Image (cartoon, helix red, strand yellow):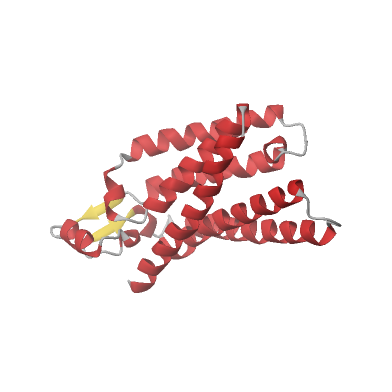
Amino acid sequence: MGSHFASGQLVTLLSIIAALYYAAAVVRSRGRDQVSNTLHTIMYVAMAVMPWAWYTHVPVPAQVLFFSGAAAWFTWCILYANDGDQHHDRAVALGYHATMMIAMVWMAMAMSPLVATAGSAEAMSAMGHLSSGHAAGVTMIAQEGWALPVSWVLGILFVLGAAITALVTIARLVRADDVDDAIAAQLVHGLADTVGAAALGIAFLAWMT
């Protein structure tokens, strides 16, 4: 139980870092890019608070509807991708972000209580942490045998995404003759995406299982 509590705290910390970056990006961006950054911010805020018991008061249908809409937005943006210099200009990046939003849909559904016995609310309240359904008397959909492989696949996907993003960011730094403002912005963006993908990977592989 302690390990799930710790992994939930780590998910919260990493998600807050990513949310702060994208919140700042919302202010700087315009148009489709601003909408995309807003969706990222909301997603990471949701991830930051999801490990805590009071998040269960947020209706699951509302989460599913929002993140499904966000996935549809990034899929629609692929039609306008032009492989430019901006992050949201690239079809691959947009597809990856759409996958993130689909993963959030699964996370919202998988964290729904399957069975709750008397005293489970008190147990969760005392812990102050949902702990992926490991509180006494609570069983989550994510803990069902058929659901675990889905979470594992998504977790591995985002761990690989974090690793690839980190390597690409390091490669940019190594190739750069001079770290100007544009390169520095790309490096910070890469770091934020690495942290965010790591949060998702940890959520699926450690906290939810």
Quadrant showing the N terminus? bottom left
Q: List x then y, in percent, for residue 71.
A: 54, 36
Give the residue at the far right of this rendering: 177
Going by the image, does 126 lie left or right of 39? left
The residue drawn where x is 27% and y is 50% is 54
Left or right: where 43 falls relative to 171: left
Q: Position of residue 141 (x, y in %)?
A: 35, 53
Q: Confirm whether residue 149 shows in the render.
A: no
Q: Position of residue 66 (x, y in %)?
A: 43, 34
Q: Is 125 left, or right, of 96 in this rendering?
A: left
Q: Nearer the viewer, residue 143 or 196?
A: 196
Q: Residue at x 31, y 48 (%)?
A: 55
Residue furthest left as drawn: 118
Residue drawn at (71%, 37%) of the image: 91
Q: Is residue 111 above or below residue 37?
A: below
> Where, quadrant-wise, is the C terminus in this rendering?
bottom left
**Count of number-bearing discs:** 0
Taking depth in this image into account, of 82 and 173 the one nearest to the observer is 173
Residue at x 55%, y 42% (from the top left corner): 24
Quarter of the image for residue 163 reads: bottom right
Image position of 81 (left or right of 203): right
Asked if one can make out residue 112 in the rendered structure from this viewpoint, the answer is yes
